[in-house]
Image (spheres, rainbow, N blue to C red):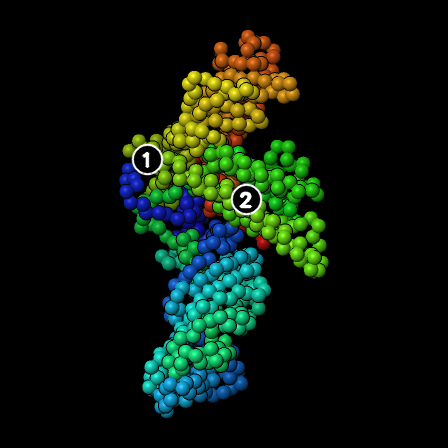
Amino acid sequence: MNSLLFLTLLFLGKVLHAQPNCVEAGACQSQLLRVEVSNSLFQNSGEGFLPVLRNLAESPTLGSLLQGPRNIPPIAFPHNRQICQDEKQQGNPDFRNVDCQQNGLCQSGNLLPSVRERICFHLPCPIFEGTLLTGKCQSQAQIYTTNVSFPSPVTIDQIRLTPTKVEFASNSARLCFEINELAVSASVSLGLDTNRTALPDRAIGVSGIHTRIPSPRKVCLSANVDLTRPNPVSGFTITTQDNGPFITDEMITQAAGNVTLSGLSGYPPAQLDRVKGEILPVMIQPLRESIESGVKTSLAKVFETEINKLASANTGRSSGLVSMNGMMNEIGLGNQRFKEQVDRLECTSLAAARRPIPADHACRQIPNYADQINSPILGLNQQWDFKALLAEGQRLNVTSEGLKQRLIGMKELFRANFDPNDRPEDHSQFAEEGRRRWSEYNEESIRKYVDPVIEKISQNQLQTHLPNFVEFQDLQLGRFGRDVGVSVPEICSDTQPSPHARRAIANCPVQTYVDLNEMNKLFEKMWQEGSFCQTGRGAFAASPQRYADSGKPQGSGCAFEVNNVSCFINSPPRILWDARTRKYKTSLALKECFYPGSLAEIGKFGGDLNVDLSFQPKVCSGGDFCIDRPTTSVRLRPGSGRFGLQHEPGNNWDQTILNTINSSVTNAIGRSLRIPLTGGIRSLTSVPLEAEGRVDAGPGYFGACLRPAAVRGQ
């Protein structure tokens, strides 16, 4: 399968979930979203796969995927490759036909006894006789190990890694990382070859191993990736960049003091501690190699699974279901408003951690904020932004899984915050104590401000009544290339294909089309259930009508607020096509708008407004449909005006107020009426697609031409 095809799969969701009893798969023929990938792009797999690998390596959630227990199958006991290689180079004839890189070499029945003694781990047999099994060794002088098993899962308790290099060429992938933190727990059982003895034990067990790397390790993961094969990943290996051990002898020595030994029947329990002190030093190297093999296997399984998800062919799947949260990340006034706050916090946190702010960071586009970017005291605003994040997160209808995952991934950035008075070169006891307290302060900020917001988003997601899944329709080879469609069966009523299914943009590498009729149904559902709104849901309701002391209306409904102007959205937005102007348009019936006014309540107003927006389509934010240069008309519904809007129509003061609020309302609605062609799920999957520039606009549809994002050097 070609890389651009699985880019499309990524674009629609990272994992396809087969969900019984949710909806009837295939019931909806019309497509909310259709994506087609040109056959002309199937010739160059690396063009799309390299950025996908980079996105995987840089994913903020990669660490959480790697952490946790892994069941590792038994492995052949590792031999001493270095001694084997040295003997071959020195011309030892016994090693002439020995393949030193062969796994399980010590289990080979053809291995010469002289070779086995040199490279295979063994212990003097009398060690196992102890005081209770004297003579059980019979004629055997040495006991060789046979295999390594892991009675309990190898667990990566903690891991923190930074990508340093990602390469993909000639079907070979290479990902390199610096592992900054690694804590591992394991239990190991070493199989023993006691067949020619009368010893009862067949293995030595070492349990309760807990260790962590004392300093960063640089490792690389390599694999062969053939996108045309059903199982595209093979030959997966993990190596250290300095060719040294991944798990060091020092790490095992550090952990040895608290381990428990089993399988030594030759000793009474009172003597086991003494025996442990004699045996464990001899077993340091095989234990290290065994645990290293287990950790490498654990890491390899995760990376192999993730890369297979990206590259595997799914042509045998007729349909599947994708989480709605991933699809709708960018739609909704609450998500939009909260995203801006997350952008602000990330910006000030980068400054607080003394890191550069990228030139394309979204915070640079926030009105009246860009001028602060180069301020030397920008990082001091982090605490204000933490507090604002908590306040907005608790108040707004935030349901975006992408924003939640972004906050989870940003925790490491928050932990990197520096004390402004810190001098890294100062290693005094006073300075170290200050750094410890500052670290505790950062953890407290996460616990106090960030974790409650993450929990609130999870609660909002559980409480929303939006369709839980969208249908991922058949993957087909069509007239254009590969064709993938997405529908929402719970709100879809059409059993016939979309009337726009045959539209196409000429010579376009990746094209995507939205059925606006289906999108309008989704908008209505989101408005009813509140996920489109900053706060509340549905039509305005207040009986009897009440007002706060400030004059602000009290009631429930789908609401938003921007620049102190608050309104209820009394009916769902709909995107329609105006054949006369050849533009899209939408009308909003805003109920009980209110502005508290400035000093001495100058400019205070209230009333019901009708807003008409007419706009050209645009592709923005890496591929989303959005509004470009809207023409806006704001009209007061006669008889609804309060305060400054009680004047007769045509009054200059009346028109001045309407002109003033025009930009605020347009800004709030215009920024949120967007369709996630790619950017809507970018925060979950980092799809490497970008707008090519051409669009296809018309009644009931919107199409855009995309291309693989440019590969930027590292």
Residue 707 visible at all? no
Name the amino acid, label 1: Glu
Q: Which mark is residue 490?
A: 1
Residue visible at 40% across and 36% down in the picture: 464
Residue count near mark 1 (Cα–Cα under 10 Å), binned few <14, some 14–19, many ≥20:
some
The location of residue 366, given as percent across then percent down, is: 60, 35
Between 653 and 155, the one lying in front of the other is: 155
Question: Marks 1/2: CA distance?
Answer: 38 Å
Residue 521, placed above or below residue 268: above
The location of residue 490, given as percent across then percent down, is: 32, 35
Residue visible at 30% across and 41% down in the picture: 22
Name of the residue lying farthest toward the top? 648
If the image is split into quadrants, where does the C terminus sit?
bottom right
Task: Give the labeled residue for mark 2.
Answer: 448
Quadrant in the rendering for residue 176: bottom right
Name of the residue lying farthest toward the front? 270
Residue visible at 47% across and 76% down in the picture: 286
Q: Give yes or no for contact between labels 1 and 2 (Cβ–Cβ under 8 Å).
A: no
Residue 409 visible at all? yes
The location of residue 585, given as percent across then percent down, is: 47, 24
Residue 155, placed above or below residue 269: above
Quadrant in the rendering for residue 364: top right
| Mark 1 / mark 2, whichever is N-terminal | 2
Between 685 and 396, the one lying in front of the other is: 396
Between 218 and 237, the one lying in front of the other is: 218
* Numbered disc 2: secondary structure: helix
